[in-house]
C-alpha cells in the first residue's frame, strides 16, 4: 500500500488555500480560493499601474507596476485582484497570459511581463514586392485583431 498523499497548506501554482481535516471556518478558505480562481479565469487587467486606484470595483484586476505604493507596495509584477472589497495578490507564473483592456493587447509572463511592440506596415524601399507587402499587411492586421499587436 502506498503512503497517503500529503498536501501543503496552499496549492503549488497559485497558492490557493487548501482545507485540512478539522479546520474551523472552512468557508473562509474556500471563498478565498474561489475568489482567486475567479480572478484568473479568462484573466484581464484594467491596466498596469504602481498606484492602487481610488474607487476599484470588485472583479477588476490590475498589473502592479515597479515601484508600487500604498497597499500594493512589495507586490511589483503581481496581479492585484479586487474581491469583496479587498486586494488579493497573485504572483505570476511562466506562461501566464492576461488581456490588457487599456491597450487592447495580450501580455505574457516569462520571467517578467512582456508584450509585443507596435509594428508598422512595410513602406518604402528600392525594390517593392506588392504581393509580399500585402501578405505582411494582412498578417499585421490579423495579429492586431487577436490582441498580439496593439491596435493602431
Image (cartoon, rainbow, N blue to C red):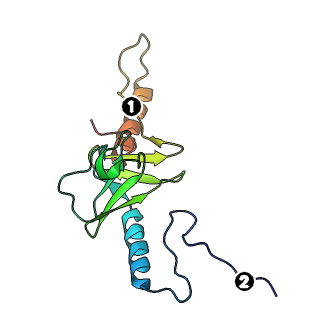
Residue beneath the point at 37% across and 71% down: 35
Q: How many marks?
A: 2
Q: Which residue lies under the disc numbered 1?
A: 134
Q: Quadrant of residue 85?
A: bottom left
Q: Residue furthest top?
A: 126
Image coords of residue 10 (percent x, y) = 54, 70
Quick check: 144 above or below 15?
above
Q: Where in the figure is residue 74, as x and y percent of width and height? A: 41, 48
Q: Nearer the viewer, residue 114 or 90?
A: 90
Mark 2 crowd level (few <14, some 14–19, many ≥20, 10 Å Cα):
few
**Image quadrant where residue 27 sits:** bottom left
Direction from residue 112 to residue 49 in the image, left or right: left
* Cα distance in 3D space between marks 2 and 1: 61 Å
Q: Is residue 51 left or right of residue 92?
A: left
Instruction: Determine the secondary structure under disc 1.
Output: helix
Q: Given the current orientation, which residue lies at the most extreme left position?
A: 55
Q: Is residue 34 above or below residue 50?
A: below
Residue at the image position 27 percent from the left and 35 percent from the top: 152
The quadrant in which the N terminus is found is: bottom right
Closer to viewer: mark 2 or mark 1: 2
Q: Secondary structure at mark 2?
A: loop
Report the residue at 45% width, 40% height from top.
Answer: 114
Q: Position of residue 16 (x, y in %)?
A: 49, 69
Q: Is residue 98 left or right of residue 94?
A: left
Whether tag 2 and tag 1 are in contact, CB under 8 A, the answer is: no
Image location (x, y in percent) of residue 98: 40, 53
| Residue 34 in the image: above or below residue 138 | below
Q: Which mark is residue 56?
A: none
Would you call the spot at circle 1 few (<14 residues within 10 Å), some (14-19), or many (20 or more)?
few
- 2 or 1: tag closer to the N-terminus: 2
The residue that label 2 is drawn on is 4
* In front of the other: 90 or 26: 26
Amino acid at each position: 500500500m502506498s503512503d497517503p498523499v500529503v498536501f501543503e497548506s496552499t496549492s503549488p501554482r497559485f497558492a490557493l488555500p487548501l482545507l485540512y481535516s478539522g479546520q474551523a471556518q472552512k468557508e473562509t478558505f474556500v471563498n478565498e480560493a474561489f475568489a482567486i480562481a475567479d480572478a484568473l479565469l479568462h484573466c484581464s487587467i484594467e491596466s498596469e499601474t504602481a498606484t492602487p486606484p481610488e474607487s476599484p470595483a470588485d472583479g477588476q484586476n490590475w498589473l502592479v507596476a515597479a515601484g508600487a505604493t500604498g497597499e500594493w507596495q512589495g507586490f511589483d509584477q503581481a496581479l492585484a485582484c479586487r474581491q469583496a472589497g479587498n486586494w488579493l495578490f497573485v504572483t505570476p507564473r511562466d506562461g501566464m497570459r492576461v488581456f490588457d483592456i487599456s491597450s487592447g493587447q495580450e501580455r505574457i509572463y516569462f520571467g517578467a511581463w512582456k508584450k509585443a511592440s507596435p509594428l508598422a506596415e512595410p513602406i518604402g524601399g528600392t525594390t517593392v514586392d506588392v504581393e509580399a507587402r500585402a501578405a505582411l499587411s494582412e498578417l499585421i492586421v490579423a495579429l492586431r485583431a487577436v490582441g498580439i499587436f496593439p491596435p493602431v
